[in-house]
Each structure stands twice: as structure tokens, then as C-alpha cells.
Amino acid sequence: MSILRILLAEDDDDDREMFCTFLAGRNDVELFACVENGLEAIDALAAIISSDKLPDMILLDQNMPKQNGLQTLKILKENPVYAAIPVFIYSTYADGALRERSLQAGAISVFSKPFTMQGYNEMLESMLSAMHRSSFDKNIL
């Protein structure tokens, strides 16, 4: 099993801590970068010189200051260097409109932000399971 490199963009300190706690306990992932908004995510990617050093997946909170998840997703998908990186969006308010806009913009899936550690574990397990499959089915997540 290969190790997945993950870029996380999450502005909430507590939520970021839950993600990091979950990821630190796994041997199949490595945290590429943990940033507080979409602008910092783009900057972290731009600092990489070699494409083999890019993350394998990107997790974006929708509601972040400066640049939200959907805005960041659109920028990523417009750049040929980053366009193939799978992106997952999550939000406290993951309604049908956000899901539709995010999927149309190229997200693999959209998740409702959980409120418990168990919920974070389940959401991240779903994301990682999708990454370990050979193809993505946007309808099953």
C-alpha cells in the first residue's frame, strides 16, 4: 500500500487538530501541509518545484477566510499542474447547491463536516477509501 500525501486547508483550530490526530495514527498517509485557508493552500502548492512532490489528495473546508473551498477548487482545476489532484470539499453547511457546484467544478465528493471525533474518523475513512480505489464514483460518497 502506498502512502498518500495530503494537503489540508482548514481554518478552525479544533477541526484541524481532529484531522491531524486522526492522520497521525495512520501509516498510510503523510500530511503534506496543513494550512488555514485557500490562499495558503495555493501558496503551499506553488512552492513545490517537482510534480512528484505534489500531494496525492487535497481536503478543503468550504467556509474559510480569504478564499473558500470552492474558490480554491476552481483555481486548482484551472491549473494543469494541479488539475489531476483529487479534491474533497467538506462543510458544516454541505447542502445540495454546494454539492452540485463543487462536483461540477471537479471535486471528488462533498461531505458534511462532522461534530465528533468518530464522525471525523468516518469521514476521513470514506475519503481515504475513495483514494485507494482505482476509480472514483462521485455518487457513492
Image: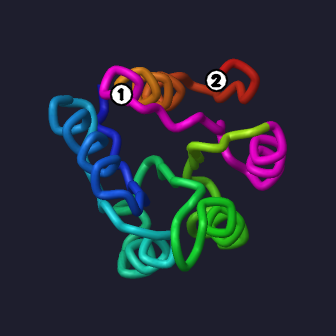
C-alpha span from label 2 to label 1: 19 Å
Q: Is residue 64 left or right of residue 52?
A: right
Indicate whether 94 appears above or below 79: above
In-front residue for pair 15/37: 15
Look at mark 1 in the image and give the residue it sits on. Answer: 116
Assess whether residue 119 is covered by the magenta stretch.
yes
Quarter of the view holding residue 96 = top right
* Label drawn at residue 102: none
Residue 124: % across, % down: 41, 30
Secondary structure under tag 1 reads: loop
Neighbour class for label 2 at 10 Å: few (<14), some, many (≥20)?
A: some
Neighbour class for label 1 at 10 Å: few (<14), some, many (≥20)?
A: few
Which residue does the image show at 68% across and 68% down from the upper left? 71
Residue 106: % across, % down: 73, 50
Give the residues drawn in magenta, as a range: 96-120
Indicate whether 91 appears above or below 9: above
Q: Amino acid at mark 2?
A: Leu
Badge nearest the viewer, 2 or 1: 1
Q: Earlier in the sequence, mark 2 or mark 1?
A: 1
Q: Amino acid at mark 1?
A: Thr
Which part of the image, by quadrant, shows the N terminus?
top left
Residue 125: % across, % down: 41, 23
Residue 29: % across, % down: 27, 38
Q: Is residue 134 left or right of residue 50?
A: right
Q: Is residue 102 left or right of residue 88?
A: right
In-front residue for pair 98/14: 14
Which residue does the image show at 49% across and 75% down from the upper left? 42
Which part of the image, by quadrant, shows the C terminus?
top right
Look at mark 2 in the image and give the residue it sits on. Answer: 141
